């Protein structure tokens, strides 16, 4: 497992995936508070904007900044959680590197788990970068947030993204090609989104973590979504276990 | 000691039977040539032995351990696929010492020493720190052999190890494989008869998923090769063809074949060469060479596979 993780982590760095993920989420972290702060001014300064539009826009405040930050982080993060691992297993199977690795005395579980761990670490470092730059920009432009609440909120966002990443790894194990893997993972994301919007289910699905996180970041009272957190962990584990079981039955 | 054993090993893909009930034993220190035309089931057999595929029925053992996915047999196995693929962003040294050595649980220093030794052996020492992405097919094949030897395997499975190489690369690779006899049991699949003749001491011929024959090379050649005489003339083509036609009618002659100025006379039995010798002398054509044709594996192969 250690060697497989070493290889995966080296690949994250050598293929610039880590760098790309960090840059993308750093931009997402900066963009939220910046747009919240300056969008009304930018609109007001535009020549062909209808008169009075700027006046009816709500005044930018810290709540709007955190909202923009959270939306950007989750949207860009979801994109990364699909793009980073979509070829993780299927790519190795079609290229033939999986056959070379799995003819050695390693378990197929380690093969999958190392990929989830390395890609999860990449996503973690990218979210961490967003946290640092987002916290500073919100602080400078709107006022300082409680750092613990903000960190906890981002931990929940990362957990949500890990669910998507794990499901994409499962899709990558099931699919016959990278494109099919991305398609299956995207379908899973859409399904989670739709189910998350249904009132009886929404409190139990990972998307409930996002509202909880936003409240934590702003220091507002919120109903903790423990059930959603538990579901997220279960989904992550189930996706990894599913990918392992699928890979165990596959021939290379 | 038996290092490779299969019992009624069978593999089907839907309706297609890729391998019919293969029973085979390969002793330690053998260089086993697994010969067969394309699609005979050679790669399927190697994948079953390497644990990359599951048999539909039957069982295989490597070094006494049952073969299969996640089996312990993989610890004493070296496997070189037909077209080995690597992580292009790694260097050969990283791949061997960091990755392959790590997968076998070698200590870092031990893995590094072994990697350098193998890179030296396969002629890649001077590119040990270059990215694999820039390697030619021949260099990849050599690196493939090095990775298969990393754990000093008891059994080395080589799938068409020289088919993609140029003549120089082929010669080198065959030389290395031949030298491995004292270290390991080599099981090599190929459809190139010349390579098998050059280095293998035991030969198995597979045809349409069935094992047609397994025998020591010399015994196989002696048993199945057709005795033949080659006579080379310095004469016009039509006169050579006429002589070949006349000889074909002689008793004990199975057939003749004319290639350029050389006539190959196939005989029913080795002692039939005296009548050919007499016919050559009586022909009144200048004879440049007269030799007993060495039976080739090609003769055996064609006879067994093409009936």
Image (cartoon, coloured by chain):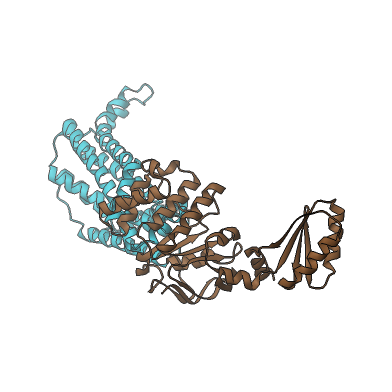
Chain colours: A cyan, B brown
Q: Using the image as rendered, state which of residue B166 and residue A189 is in the foreground.
A: B166
Residue B79 versus residue B252 in the image, above or below: above
Q: Using the image as rendered, state which of residue B223 and residue B60 is in the foreground.
A: B223
Whether residue A81 appears in this view of the structure is: no
Residue A79 versus residue B11 in the image, above or below: above
Residue B145 image position (x, y, % from top left): 43, 54
Residue, x 81% and y 65% (percent of image)? B278
Residue A134 versus residue B189 in the image, above or below: above
Residue A230 image position (x, y, % from top left): 23, 61
Q: Using the image as rendered, state which of residue B223 and residue B44 is in the foreground.
A: B223
Q: Residue B241, located in which quarter of the rendered image?
A: bottom right
Q: Residue B42, located in which quarter of the rendered image?
A: bottom right
Whether residue A69 appears in this view of the structure is: yes
Residue, x 84% and y 52% (percent of image)? B237
Give the position of the N terminus of chain B as an image quadrant.
Answer: bottom left
Residue, x 21% and y 51% (percent of image)? A212
Residue A233 image position (x, y, % from top left): 25, 60
Give the position of the C terminus of chain B as an image quadrant.
Answer: bottom right
């Amino acid at each position: 497992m250690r060697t497989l993780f070493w290889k995966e982590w080296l690949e994250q760095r050598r293929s610039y995936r880590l760098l790309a993920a960090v840059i993308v989420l750093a931009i997402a972290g900066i963009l939220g508070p910046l747009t919240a702060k300056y969008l009304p001014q930018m609109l007001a300064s535009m020549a062909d904007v209808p008169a009075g539009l700027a006046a009816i826009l709500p005044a930018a405040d810290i709540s709007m900044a955190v909202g923009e930050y959270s939306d950007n982080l989750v949207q860009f993060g979801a994109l990364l959680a699909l793009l980073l691992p979509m070829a993780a297993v299927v790519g190795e199977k079609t290229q033939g590197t999986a056959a070379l690795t799995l003819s050695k005395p390693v378990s197929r579980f380690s093969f999958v788990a190392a990929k989830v761990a390395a890609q999860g670490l990449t996503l973690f470092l990218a979210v961490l970068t967003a946290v640092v730059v987002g916290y500073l920009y919100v602080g400078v432009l709107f006022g300082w947030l409680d750092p613990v609440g903000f960190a906890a909120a981002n931990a929940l966002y990362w957990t949500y993204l890990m669910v998507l990443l794990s499901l994409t790894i499962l899709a990558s194990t099931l699919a016959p090609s990278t494109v099919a893997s991305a398609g299956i993972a995207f379908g899973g994301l859409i399904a989670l989104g739709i189910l998350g919007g249904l009132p009886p289910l929404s409190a139990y699905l990972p998307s409930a973590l996002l509202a909880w996180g936003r409240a934590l970041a702003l220091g507002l009272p919120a109903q903790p979504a423990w059930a959603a957190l538990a579901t997220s962990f279960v989904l992550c584990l189930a996706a990894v276990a599913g990918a392992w079981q699928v890979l165990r039955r596959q021939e290379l | 000691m038996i290092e490779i054993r299969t019992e009624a090993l069978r593999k089907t893909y839907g309706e297609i039977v890729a391998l019919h009930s293969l029973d085979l034993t390969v002793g330690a220190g053998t260089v086993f040539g697994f010969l067969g035309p394309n699609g005979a089931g050679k790669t399927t057999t190697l994948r079953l032995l390497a644990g990359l595929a599951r048999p539909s029925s039957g069982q295989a053992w490597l070094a006494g351990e049952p073969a299969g996915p996640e089996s312990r047999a993989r610890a004493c196995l070296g496997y070189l696929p037909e077209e080995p693929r690597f992580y292009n962003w790694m260097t050969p040294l990283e791949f061997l010492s960091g990755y392959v050595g790590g997968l076998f649980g070698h200590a870092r220093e031990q893995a590094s020493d072994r990697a350098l030794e193998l890179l030296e052996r396969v002629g890649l020492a001077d590119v040990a720190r270059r990215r694999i992405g820039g390697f030619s097919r021949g260099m990849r094949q050599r690196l493939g052999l090095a990775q298969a030897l990393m754990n000093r395997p008891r059994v080395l499975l080589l799938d068409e190890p020289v088919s993609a190489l140029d003549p120089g690369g082929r010669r080198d690779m065959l030389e290395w494989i031949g030298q491995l006899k004292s270290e390991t049991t080599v099981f090599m699949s190929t459809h190139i008869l010349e390579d098998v003749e050059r280095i293998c001491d035991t030969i198995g011929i597979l045809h349409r998923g069935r094992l047609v024959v397994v025998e020591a090379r010399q015994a196989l050649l002696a048993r199945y090769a057709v005795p033949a005489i080659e006579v080379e003339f310095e004469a016009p083509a039509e006169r050579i063809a006429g002589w070949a036609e006349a000889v074909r009618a002689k008793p004990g002659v199975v057939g003749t074949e004319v290639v350029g100025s050389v006539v190959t006379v196939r005989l029913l039995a080795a002692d039939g060469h005296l009548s050919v010798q007499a016919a050559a002398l009586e022909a009144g054509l200048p004879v440049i060479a007269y030799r007993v044709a060495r039976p080739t594996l090609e003769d055996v192969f064609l006879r067994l596979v093409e009936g």
